[in-house]
Image: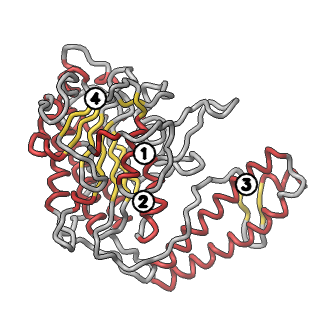
C-alpha cells in the first residue's frame, strides 16, 4: 500500500501520478490601481550560437563614447547614444558551447548538486517578476521559438527558470502569444468560473492526501514531496490570480497588433514577437518579458541553406557570410524594436523606452568560445548612462554582475544574483 501511495496521490475526485511538475512560489497576487508614474519594465532577449567575433565586437582598445560601432552592430547607429556595448562578461561555470541560453540569466553551476549532472537556479527575469508581476495580468511573459535546440539554446523551455531551478514554459510562436495576450476566450464567464472552482476542489483534496503520505517517508522522499507541495501551492496561486482577472476584459493597444496569419518563421517571426512585446507593455499586461530567439529558421528566412550549428563553425567562406548577415539582421531588428519603444508614449508623455531595461546577447561568444558574452543593453529604466563601450578590466567579470546591476537599477533590493561579485559601477557613472 505504501508503494502505491508513493506512486499516486488520490482523493475522492482525483488521482495524480508522481512525480509532478514543480513550479516557483509566487507571492500572492494583489491587484492595484494604475499608478500615474509609468512602471519599470525589464526585457531580456537572447540568441543561440553567439556572434561573429571578427565583425561583431567593437575595437576593445577604444572605449567610452568615442568608439565606433562594428559592422555587426552598424544598424544600431541611430541609437548609439542610447545603447551600451559591454565586453568581458562571462558565466564562469558555463562549459557547454551548445547551450546559448540555459544558464544565460542564472549563472548557475550545472554540477552544484553532488551526484547530479544538471542543476539550475532562478533567472534574473523571475527575480524581477516577483515584484513587478504583482499588479499585472501576467506575472511575466516568456516567448520562445520552435526547435530551440537547433537554435543553440540547450535545455529549458524558455530563458526563464523558477526559484527551484525548474524551467518555465514559453510561448513558442506569434499566434500562440497573440491568443494568450490579447484574444478573448469563447467560454462564458460562468463556465470558466465553474472550471476554476472544480480545479481548486481537486487541489484541496489532493493536498490532504499528500499530508497523510508524508508520515513515515524517508528523508529523500520527504524532500521530493516538499517539492511537490511547492508546485501545488504555485498552481493554487496561479488559479487565484486567474479568478481575479476573469471578469476584467483584456485590453488592446491603441494601435492594435494584427492577428498573425499562418506559420510565420524567422525574420518576420522575430519582428512580430517584438511587436507583441510592445503591445503587451503598452496595455501593462506584463512588466517582465523574455525572448529566446530562433536561429535555424531565422537564417533560413534570409536565404541560408545551412543549419545554425554549421554556421556557428564558420570559416572565411560562405558560413562566415551567413554568420555576418545573421548579426546585421539581428541588429536591424533590435534597432527597429528600440524605434518602437521610443515612439510608444506613456500616459505622462514619456516613452516606453524611458522606463524599460532592455538587454540583448548570448551565453556564447562564438564557435565554442565561452568568454566575452556578446552584450548590448538599452533603455532608461535602470538608470544606466548610455552611449558608451565598456570593456571590463577582468576578462572573466561575471555576467551576473550585469543582471544584479540592472535589477538594482530598476529599484529592486537584491543582494546578489547567481555568481555575481558586485554591481558594475561604470554603468551608472
Between the C-alphas of marks 4 and 1, the distance is 18 Å
Task: Give the mark count.
Answer: 4
3D distance between C-alphas at marks 2 and 4 = 31 Å
Neighbour tally class for label 1: few under 14, some 14-19, many 20 plus, Cα within 10 Å: many
| SS for callout 2 | loop
Of the numbered discs in the image, which one, if any, rests on residue 226? 3
Q: Secondary structure at mark 3?
A: helix
Question: Disc number at residue 112?
Answer: none
Residue 360 placement (x, y as % from top left): 30, 42
Which residue in the protein does label 2 denote?
140
Observer able to see residue 123? yes
Question: Which mark sits nearer the N-terminus, 2 or 1?
Answer: 2
Q: What is the spatial separation of the Cα atoms under label 2 and label 3, in whole angstroms?
A: 25 Å
Q: Are marks 1 and 3 in contact (CB under 8 Å)?
A: no
Per the model, the C-alpha gap separating discs 2 and 1 is 18 Å
Residue 382 on image: x %, y %:
31, 53
The residue identified by callout 4 is 391
Could you say which quadrant of the image residue 349 lies in?
A: bottom left
Which residue in the rendered view is the most extreme toward the left? 78
Residue 404's disc number? 1
Q: Nearer the viewer, residue 121 or 218?
A: 121
Mark 2, Cα crowd under 10 Å, few <14 / some 14-19 / many 20+, is many
Q: Secondary structure at mark 1?
A: helix
| Disc 2 + disc 4, Cβ < 8 Å | no
Q: Residue at x 26, y 43 (%)?
A: 429
Q: Position of residue 240 (x, y in %)?
A: 55, 74
Of the image marks 4 and 1, the number of the one nearer the N terminus = 4
Amino acid at each position: 500500500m505504501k508503494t502505491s501511495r508513493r506512486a499516486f496521490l488520490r482523493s475522492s475526485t482525483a488521482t495524480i501520478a508522481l512525480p509532478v511538475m514543480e513550479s516557483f512560489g509566487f507571492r500572492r497576487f494583489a491587484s492595484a490601481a494604475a499608478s500615474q508614474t509609468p512602471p519599470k519594465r525589464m526585457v531580456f532577449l537572447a540568441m543561440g550560437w553567439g556572434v561573429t567575433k571578427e565583425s561583431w565586437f567593437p575595437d576593445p582598445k577604444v572605449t567610452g563614447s568615442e568608439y565606433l560601432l562594428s559592422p555587426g552592430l552598424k544598424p544600431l547607429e541611430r541609437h548609439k547614444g542610447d545603447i551600451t556595448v559591454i565586453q568581458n562578461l562571462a558565466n564562469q561555470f558555463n562549459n557547454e558551447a551548445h547551450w546559448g541560453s540555459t544558464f544565460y540569466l542564472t549563472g548557475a553551476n550545472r554540477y552544484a548538486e553532488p551526484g547530479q549532472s544538471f542543476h539550475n537556479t532562478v533567472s534574473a527575469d523571475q527575480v524581477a517578476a516577483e515584484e513587478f508581476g504583482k499588479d499585472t495580468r501576467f506575472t511575466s511573459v516568456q516567448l520562445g521559438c520552435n526547435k530551440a535546440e537547433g537554435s543553440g539554446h540547450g535545455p529549458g523551455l524558455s530563458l526563464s527558470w523558477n526559484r527551484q531551478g525548474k524551467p518555465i514554459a514559453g510561448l513558442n510562436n506569434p499566434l500562440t502569444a497573440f491568443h494568450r495576450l490579447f484574444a478573448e476566450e469563447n467560454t462564458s464567464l460562468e463556465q470558466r468560473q465553474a472550471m476554476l472552482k472544480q480545479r481548486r476542489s481537486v487541489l484541496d483534496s489532493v493536498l490532504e492526501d499528500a499530508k497523510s503520505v508524508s508520515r513515515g517517508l524517508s528523508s529523500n522522499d520527504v524532500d521530493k514531496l516538499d517539492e511537490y507541495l511547492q508546485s501545488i501551492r504555485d498552481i493554487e496561486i496561479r488559479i487565484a490570480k486567474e479568478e481575479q482577472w476573469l471578469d476584467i476584459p483584456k485590453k488592446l493597444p491603441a494601435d492594435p497588433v494584427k492577428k498573425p496569419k499562418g506559420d510565420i518563421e524567422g525574420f518576420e517571426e522575430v519582428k512580430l514577437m517584438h511587436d507583441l512585446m510592445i503591445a503587451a507593455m503598452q496595455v501593462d499586461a506584463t512588466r517582465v518579458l523574455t525572448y529566446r530567439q530562433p536561429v535555424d529558421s531565422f537564417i533560413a528566412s534570409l536565404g541560408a541553406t545551412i543549419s545554425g550549428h554549421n554556421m556557428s563553425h564558420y570559416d572565411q567562406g560562405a558560413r562566415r557570410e551567413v554568420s555576418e548577415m545573421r548579426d546585421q539582421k539581428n541588429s536591424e531588428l533590435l534597432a527597429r524594436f528600440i524605434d518602437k519603444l521610443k515612439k510608444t508614449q506613456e500616459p505622462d508623455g514619456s516613452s516606453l523606452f524611458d522606463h524599460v531595461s532592455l538587454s540583448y546577447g548570448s551565453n556564447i561568444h562564438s564557435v565554442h568560445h565561452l568568454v566575452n558574452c556578446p552584450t548590448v543593453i538599452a533603455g532608461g529604466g535602470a538608470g544606466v548612462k548610455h552611449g558608451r563601450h565598456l570593456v571590463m578590466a577582468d576578462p572573466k567579470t561575471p555576467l551576473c554582475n550585469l543582471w544584479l546591476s540592472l535589477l538594482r537599477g530598476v529599484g529592486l533590493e537584491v543582494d546578489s544574483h547567481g555568481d555575481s561579485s558586485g554591481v558594475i559601477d561604470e554603468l551608472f557613472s
